[in-house]
């Protein structure tokens, strides 16, 4: 079967300089447990390329607040969410995203 992706991301880059943690309140998962990623990308593509991703966490991520260490990221990045797998049962729910 072909790999299918569900992607959600902010369309403008965010300057992460001076922030330590990205907080994601929501859920992201594929019902069969395939790849789920919450991350920051210097350049974003729908394939979720590892080449330009300075920080990420992998899931599945159940509904709740999740944190991503971004203390080493001192540049503008896209904030994105990617769920991939071989079927259509993908969930990305974003209640809020904030930085501290």
Image (cartoon, rainbow, N blue to C red):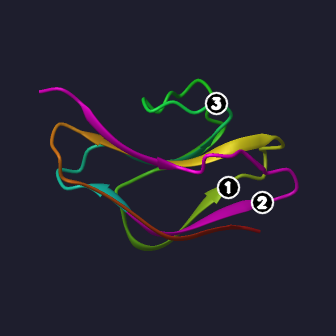
Q: Where is residue 22 shown, x and y percent of the image?
A: 66, 61
Residue 17 place in picture, x, y as percent = 86, 50
Report crowding for label 3: few under 14, some 14 to 19, many 20 or more residues within 10 A (C-alpha). some
Q: Is residue 26 above or below residue 22?
A: below
The residue mark sitting in front, 3 or 1, is 3
The residue under label 1 is 69
Q: Which mark is residue 43?
A: 3
Front label number (2 vs 3): 3
Q: Earlier in the sequence, mark 1 or mark 2?
A: 2
The residue that mark 2 highlights is: 20
Disc 3 element:
loop
The percent coordinates of residue 59 (x first, y second) are: 39, 53
The residue sitting at 79% across, 51% down in the picture is: 16
Q: Quadrant of residue 77?
A: top right
| SS at badge 2 | loop
Label 1–label 2 contact, CB within 8 A: yes
> Gap in Å between the C-alphas at discs 1 and 2?
6 Å
Per the rendered image, the range of residues in magenta is: 1-27
């Amino acid at each position: 079967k072909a790999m299918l992706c569900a992607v959600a991301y902010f369309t403008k880059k965010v300057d992460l300089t001076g922030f330590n943690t990205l907080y994601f309140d929501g859920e992201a998962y594929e019902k069969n447990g395939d790849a789920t990623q919450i991350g920051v990308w210097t350049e974003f593509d729908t394939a979720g390329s590892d080449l330009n991703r300075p920080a990420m966490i992998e899931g599945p991520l159940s509904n709740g607040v999740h944190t991503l260490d971004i203390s080493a990221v001192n540049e503008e990045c896209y904030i994105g969410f990617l769920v991939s797998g071989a079927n259509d049962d993908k969930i990305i729910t974003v209640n809020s995203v904030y930085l501290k």
